[in-house]
Amino acid sequence: MELKEAITKRRTTNTAFADRKVSEEHIELLIKMASHSPSHFNSQPWRFIIIDDKKTIGRIAKIAGDSMVELMDDGRFWKQYRKYFRFSEEEIEKTKDGIHIDHLPVFLKPFAKSIFSEAGGKVISKFKVSRILGNDEEKLVSSSPLLFAITLTKDEYKKEELSGFYSVISMGAVIQTLWLVTTSIGMGMQFISTPGEIPENWKALSDILEIEDNYELMAVFRMGYIDKSIKRPTIDWKSSQRKSPEELAFRNRFGENLK
């Protein structure tokens, strides 16, 4: 697959993966390609953890699912992300950003806008939406053949210093490399984000992975081979729209038309 094709075909995988182990050849390829990502002064501040032990994956999955339920039930999820929700093709075509929540159980569709709102707590509780999403999250993670964790050394990742900024930029390059490589070899990946929004749950993940004191756990992704025949989760969304270059970029100074 050519680079431009991999970039445009890259997607976050919301569905389960094929019931198939990731080959050692592909694991080695992912690590090797990630190692070629740029870093400040070639500091290579990252260390990776490949997680393929099913019990460990299951423990992480439980934390991820419980985190989703907690974030929804206490309102944090809605307050943080409601502005990105879209409920029709027309809406997402107009904004060209956010996520289109297009896959819901039939009985929930009439209540979609009420559910996915800051004021939707009662509706969420009534229809057990948080538990549906939490269960889906746990199933997706627990059934994944591989998790890929990224840590940064605290020698570089100093939050209030430039080295911290540079190391995060470098990690972003690693993540993009992983996404392009997985796309090119028929794999998918998805960020396991919910535990990261609850400090004690993120610490629990760090403890499970026995992260050394001089390293900070930064991100965990689930990975596996794509199987297009697998059904989508109970509640799902898509996010393929992109803003035009003219909306995203200016020439010479901020606000000046690109053309």
Image (spheres, rainbow, N blue to C red):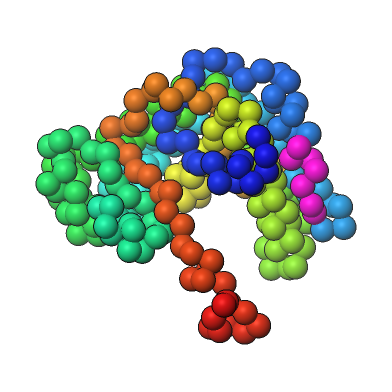
Instruction: List x then y, in percent, for residue 10.
Output: 55, 42
Vertical relation: 132 (above or below) 174: above
Q: Quadrant of residue 5?
A: top right
Residue 33 picture location, percent across and down: 76, 37
Residue occupying image coordinates x 48% and y 64% = 244
Q: Is residue 83 magenta?
A: no
Q: Which quadrant would residue 250 be assigned to in this image?
A: bottom right
Identify the image quadrant of the N terminus: top right
Q: Seen from this angle, which residue lies furthest front? A: 259
> Horizontal placement of 108 versus 80: left or right?
left
Kindly tell me whether residue 245 is visible in this rendering: yes
Q: Where 124 falls versus 189 (above or below)? A: below
Residue 181, position as x, y percentages in the image: 66, 36
Q: Which residue sits at x=33%, y=39%?
A: 236
Residue located at (57% from left, 72% from top): 249
**Part of the protein shown in magenta:** 33-39
Q: Residue at x 42, y 36 (%)?
A: 14
* Front residue (pair 88, 108): 88
Asked whether, in this view, residue 244 is left or right of residue 235, the answer is: right
The answer to which quarter of the image holds residue 133 is: top left
68 or 148: nearer the viewer = 148
Return the residue nearer the eye: 16 or 251: 251
Q: Quadrant of the C terminus?
A: bottom right
Q: Is residue 150 visible?
A: no
Q: Is residue 198 left or right of residue 251?
A: left
